[in-house]
Amino acid sequence: MVELINNEGKAWLSFADGSVKGFAFEGERLLEKESLYGALTEAINRDSLADLLVRLNGNFAAVITIKNQCYLIVDKLRSYPLFYSGTHVSDVGEHLLKTIPSEIDEVNAYELLSLGYLSGASTLVNGIKSVVAGSYVVINTEDGSFSSYDYFSHIYKKVGRTKEEIFKLSQERLEAGFQRMLGSLKKNQPLLIPLSGGYDSRLIACLCKKFGLENVTCFTYGREDSFEVAISKKVASALGYKWYFVEYSEEVWNRFLSSKDFLQYCHFAGNLTANPHFQDLPALLKLKEQGVITPDMVVIPGHSGDLLGGSKIPVQILEGHLKSFRLENLSRLIFDNFFDLNVLNRKYKQIIIAKINSELQEYKSGSLASFLDNYECYWFVKSKVANFLVNSMRGYEYVGLDWRLPLWDDEYVKVWYEVDWKEKFYSNLYNEFMFENYFKKSRVAFIKNKGITNTGFVNQIKKILPSFLNQVARECLQFIRSMRKQKNVNAFDDVAQILYSMISSETYDGIKRVKRGNINAAVAYYIIILVYRG
């Protein structure tokens, strides 16, 4: 039984043998609705589905049944998630709880508590799986058996280019992709940009200006005195775009977290695989109430250019602590750097590291390039980017809006995937590209606030200490910072306190230490205790 129920923002379209959602380009040819469905069914019949999916550039999903084979297809980023249990299929994970017992998977619960999202095909409930980004699943409709097929890994061979060649090609591909994106919209369709003080959303705003788009609205949110708000306002003003600000405070968060919207959104967006991303939802709801947001708007966020530029290259690599690139080092590094919301005890730490090992079974030990390819392009993109960052699009859908991700255009990301890792250290090359090719020309070359940085003393310690001691030092610093009372620019420090006051004092044997000042740690507790156990 197939039940596709999330029609917010963009609706599913049903045909004789299945349903499709979204759009894709094959070359410069736009596929959507009938043409997308036709291309997918033809590829299935010709046994060339994987080849077609590699070529498709866009945000889409499909469920197509031919004879006794049900194909669950997601794009390279899992833009629209799909879930299955036996022969039951849905686009909302929780909907499947009507068909099977709600039995929490203990290990996956601990993974969520320490990571904030799940990796691979895992969900919080035994017997329910999700389709992984860059893959498709075929279910036998007679007995519920299934096979999963990976068709895309986000790993590209590196290509040697000069800085000038990279910048030129990057601009060409970025603007060609932006033009394609506009081709998927109605003429003069109003655009909404979540404009922070950072660079990615600013790049989107600059592209809108360069393409002569006038029907553009920008918004931001947070504390009134934050650097994010100040820079966002300056950028919008310099580009001549409408700008709106929604102030966040403890009162705002108290009201939102106690509302029906929050609980409904958690059910709608968590999908048994991740903390629901709701940081901009109070602002979206307020702007919709005020009439600033209209149903015909399309949201264009800046996800996730900084990743392409090297922002997630681990500090252990940047500072030369890691010399061996074996699989066990890769799995341990992923765990140390990402599984840090709540500190797990040794038992569950080892279980999860073994799970990461199994997800990276194709990795061949050897070079730095291969190590980082699997760390960032494979594991991080297919896990956090797909399951958490792209899943944050559910927030726009919740208020009825469609969305696009132009910085994830295949041709654009390919340029930066092909850049040698060492050239992307500290994101200097990518930031220079944005400043030289866009920000300076648009007179928005404002340096973002880098927040609290390590002192020179700390940096010297990091260079001296062995890798494992450096990790201990980092955990100590994180603990000290979590105990300090600091004003978060979005008032997220209030969110963690409010959520912990709302949930029970239930504890988990596998948690060694709870990080009570961390918003995502608090959300993970809330999701498991109130949503999935309530």
Image: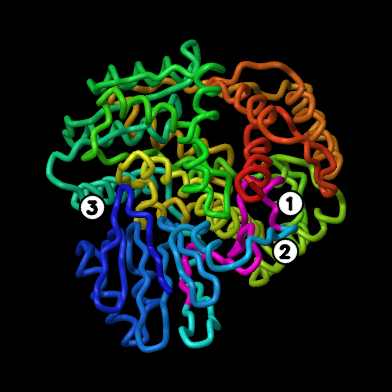
Q: Which residues are magenta?
A: 108-137
| Residue 203, percent from left and from top | 35, 34
Residue beneath the point at 82% across and 38% down? 513
| Residue 309, percent from left and from top | 49, 43
**Rounded to the nearest whole Å, what is the CA distance between mark 1 and mark 3?**
41 Å
Q: Which mark is residue 251?
A: none
**Rounded to the nearest whole Å, what is the CA distance between mark 1 and mark 2?**
12 Å
Vertical side of 49 occupied by 306: above or below: above
Q: Looking at this rendering, what residue extends furthest in the top direction?
A: 225
Where is residue 340, by image quadrant?
top right
Q: By what rule are the colours in the image chosen?
A: rainbow
Judge the density around disc 2: few (<14), some (14-19), many (≥20) Cα neighbours within 10 Å. Answer: some
Name which residue type carries label 2. Answer: Lys
Name which residue type carries label 3. Answer: Arg
Residue 127 is covered by the magenta coloring: yes
Vertical side of 88 occupied by 486: above or below: above
- Reading the image, the residue beneath label 3 is 180
- Reading the image, the residue beneath label 2 is 355
- Reading the image, the residue beneath label 1 is 110
Secondary structure type for disc 3: helix
Residue 11 is covered by the magenta coloring: no
Name which residue type carries label 1. Answer: Tyr
Mark positioned earlier in the residue sequence (1 or 2): 1
Q: Is residue 157 visible?
A: no
Secondary structure type for disc 1: helix
Where is residue 488, by image quadrant?
top right
